[in-house]
Image (tube, grey):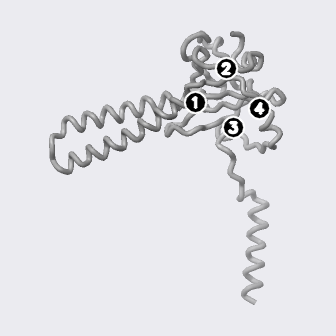
């Protein structure tokens, strides 16, 4: 009797949850900046063609990770120095400089575009960049949502060009055509405009 009541209660909860969309699937981090959740088939993801690659993004990732480890070591040593009541000025200065550099480097590498893909059939761009911790992060945006750098007064031949979006909630990124490699010039020009 009790088992049948529990089963009927579970079935009712499951029907209610399914009807109210309470159990939503977790979307990929590439969908984070989109305003509406979309489901993508594997064919749509395969159709993305690489158009730009920054070969130094691997070095940037290593530097970002090393800076994290260095900051952790400096914080531990500063804590040990404070606990032993030794000279405090030098360890606190080193700790402050290390935390400042971590913030600056983390912010710069977080906005640096490593790889850009374009899906010509859906007119979407997949942008891979690093997050603060040095891990890869992707986002997919429509080509129409990208403001060409020439429209905001940027010179595409500069070392780093601001890469902005129409939707202001999406953070600005930085693109380096000078140090990066354009793999497909035609598709790349569809994204950034004339070179």
Q: Is residue 137 left or right of residue 189?
A: left
Q: Quadrant of the C terminus?
A: top right
Q: CA distance from mark 1 to mark 2?
A: 13 Å
User: Label 2, on which residue?
Assistant: 147
Q: Earlier in the sequence, mark 3 or mark 2?
A: 3
Q: Quadrant of the N terminus?
A: bottom right
Label 1 close to label 4 by CB (< 8 Å) = no
Label drawn at residue 34: 3
Residue found 51% across the figure and 37% down from its top: 134
Say which residue appears at 71% left-offset and 10% top-offset: 194
32 up-or-down from 151: above or below:
below
Q: Residue at x 66, y 25 (%)?
A: 166
Say above or below: 59 vs 41: above
In primary-sequence order, the first of circles 2 and 4 is 4
In the shown orientation, is residue 23 left or right of residue 62? Answer: right
Tag nearer the camera, 2 or 4: 4
Residue underneath mark 4: 48
Q: In the image, which is nearer the foreground, mark 1 or mark 4?
A: 4
Secondary structure of the residue carrying numbered label 2: strand
Q: Find residue 95 and report its horizontal and vertical position in percent.
A: 29, 37
Residue 5 occupies quadrant: bottom right
Disc 1 crowd rating (10 Å Cα; few below 14, some 14-19, many 20+) is few
Q: State the CA–CA distance, disc 4 to disc 3.
A: 17 Å
Judge whether 181 appears above or below 23 on screen: above
Residue closest to the eye, 5 or 103:
103
Any mark on residue 171, and which?
Answer: 1
Q: CA distance from mark 1 to mark 3?
A: 12 Å
Q: Nearer the viewer, residue 10 or 179?
A: 179
């Amino acid at each position: 009797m009790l088992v049948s009541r529990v089963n009927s209660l579970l079935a009712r909860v499951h029907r209610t949850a399914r009807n109210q969309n309470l159990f939503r699937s977790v979307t990929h981090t590439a969908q984070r900046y989109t305003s509406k959740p979309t489901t993508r088939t594997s064919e749509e993801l395969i159709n993305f063609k690489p158009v730009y690659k920054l070969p130094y993004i691997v070095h940037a990732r290593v530097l970002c990770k090393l800076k994290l480890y260095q900051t952790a070591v400096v914080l531990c040593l500063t804590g040990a120095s404070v606990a032993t009541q030794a000279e405090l000025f030098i360890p606190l200065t080193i700790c402050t400089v290390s935390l400042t550099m971590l913030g600056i480097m983390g912010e710069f590498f977080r906005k640096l575009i490593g790889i850009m893909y374009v899906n010509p059939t859906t007119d979407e761009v997949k942008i891979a960049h690093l997050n603060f911790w040095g891990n890869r992060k992707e986002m997919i945006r429509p080509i129409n949502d990208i403001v060409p750098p020439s429209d905001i007064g940027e010179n595409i031949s500069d070392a780093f060009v601001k890469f902005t979006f129409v939707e202001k909630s999406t953070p600005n990124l930085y693109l380096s055509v000078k140090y990066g490699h354009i793999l497909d010039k035609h598709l790349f020009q569809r994204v950034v405009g004339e070179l």
